[in-house]
Amino acid sequence: MKVNLKIVRSQRRLSNLFRGILSDNPVLVGGMALPFLVVPAVSLQNGVALFCAMLLIHLPTVLVLFFLRKFLPDWSRVMVIPVVASLFLIVAYYGIQPLSPYISDSLGIYFSLLPACSMIFAGCSHMLEERKPALGKTLLRNLCNVIGFGLVACIVGGIREFFGTGTLWGRPMGLSGISSFQMAFAGFLLVGFLAVGARLLHRLVLRLGGGVPKKLLKEAAREVPKHD
Amino acid sequence: MIDALAQFFLVTLGAVFLQNALFTQGLGAERTLIKQPPSQVLRLGATLTLVMVISSILSWLVNRLLLRFPLARSYMRSILFILCIAVTYLSLYWLSKKYASKLLFPVGRELIISASSCVVLGTLLLAAHENMTFFNTIGMGIGAGAGYTMALLVITEGRDRLALLNVPKVFRGLPITLLYLGLLSLAICGLAGHQLPI
C-alpha cells in the first residue's frame, strides 16, 4: 500500500506536540526527577504540591533563558540554569501555600532541591542547544514534560498515601495502611513497576493503532499523487 | 578534641552507609541509568567529593551568616547554597583550564556533572538542616561523596550482571534498575536498624 507521507508526517507532527505527557514521559521513560518521587511523594497532596512547584519554577526558567541564551557562554550554562531556577523558588513557595500551611515542611529539603532537578536541566539545555528555538514549541514541550511529571507524582503520591496510611488527601478511606509504603525503597519499587506499566501501555497502543490511524492510512492511499 | 574527632568519623561513616545519598535519600538516582565503566565512576566520585567538600566549607559560612537573620526562609538558603556551588565550579573550572596538563585526569566532564548534580545541593541542605558544626559538615561532605561513589559502583556491577540474565523485555533498562535500587535501599534500611512496620 502506497501512503502519502505528507499526511502521515502532519499527523505525527501533531502527536509529537504532546510528547512528554504519556509517550516519552520524562520520569517513566527518561528516568528524570526520580528523587522527588522516591522520598517526598508520600501523599496525594505532596504530589500536587510537587507538580505546582515544578510548573512555577520550570516554565519561567525556560522563558528567561530563552531571552538570555545569546549572552550565555557554553561553560556558564551548567550554573546559570539552577541560579535562574532558584530565583523562582520564592514564587513557588507562595504558590503551594494554599494547599496546606505545612506543605513546605512536608516536602522538606526536596522543595529547596527543585532548582537542581535534572528535568529542568534537560529542558533548558535542549532549548539552549537548538540553533533557532521557537518559543511556543519550547514552552509547549516543557509544559508537557511538567504535566507528565505531575501525573506520575500524583499517581505515586496517591498510591503511597492510600496503601501507606489508609487515607487520601488526608481523608480516611477505611483502610489500615502499611507504613512501609512511606519509605524510600517503596518509592523506587513503585516507580519501577509504573515504568513497566507505561511500556505495556505504549505497546498496546502501537499494536492497536500502529502509530497511525487506519482511517488516515486509507485516505492517504486514495490520494497518492500521480507521477508522469 | 577526641570527642570532636569521634563525631567527625561517626558523621562520615553515617553519611556513607546509614544516610547514603542514593539509597536513603534517592539523590542522584538518574546517574545510575547511564552505562559507565568503573574507572569513570571513580573519576566522577573523586570530582564530586572535591566539589562537595569545598562547597560544604562555603555553605557552612553562609549558613552561619543566615542564622543571624531569622526572617531568612529556606528558599534563601537554597539560592545561596547554589551560588556557593557555582563559585566552587567556576574556581575548579578555571584551575583545571590553567593546569590541565598537570592534572592526574581530565576533570572537565566530571566537573560539569558534579556541579549540576542534586547530590551536592541535597547534602549541603541536609547538613544545614541538622545545624552541624564545621568539621561535621566537612565529614558529611566526604562521607556523602564516598557513599555515592560506592553506591554507583555497586549499581554499575549489578547492571552488568543483570544484562547477562534473561530479563523480560518490558523490565529491561530503567524498570529493572529501579527495582534493583529499591531492593538495595531496603537492605540499607535493615542495616540502619529500621524494622519494617507492617
Image: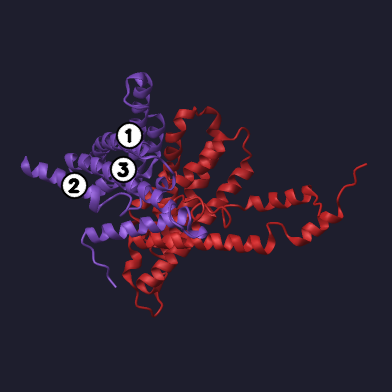
Q: Quadrant of residue B31?
A: top left
Going from N to C along the chain, the mark reached first, 2 or 3, is 2
Question: In the rendered structure, which amino acid carries the disc numbered 3?
Answer: Thr
Whole-percent x, y for residue A51 in the image: 47, 56
Mark closer to the observer (2, 1)? 1
The lab-note entry on whether marks 1 and 3 share a chain reads: yes
For disc 1, the chain is B
Going from N to C along the chain, the mark reached first, 1 or 3, is 1
Question: Which residue is painted at 59% across and 45% down in the image?
Answer: A139
Kindly indicate whether the residue at mark 1 contacts the one at mark 2 (C-beta within 8 angstroms).
no
Whole-percent x, y for residue B155 in the image: 36, 49
Q: Is residue B129 above or below residue B54?
A: below
Which chain is assigned purple?
A: B
- The residue pinned by badge 1 equals B47
Question: In the rendered structure, which amino acid carries the disc numbered 1?
Answer: Thr
For disc 3, the chain is B
Q: Is residue A187 above or below residue A140?
A: below
Front residue of B107 and B179: B179
Q: Is B125 left, or right, of A54 in this rendering? A: left
Q: Is residue B34 above or below residue A73?
A: below
Q: Which mark is residue B149?
A: 3
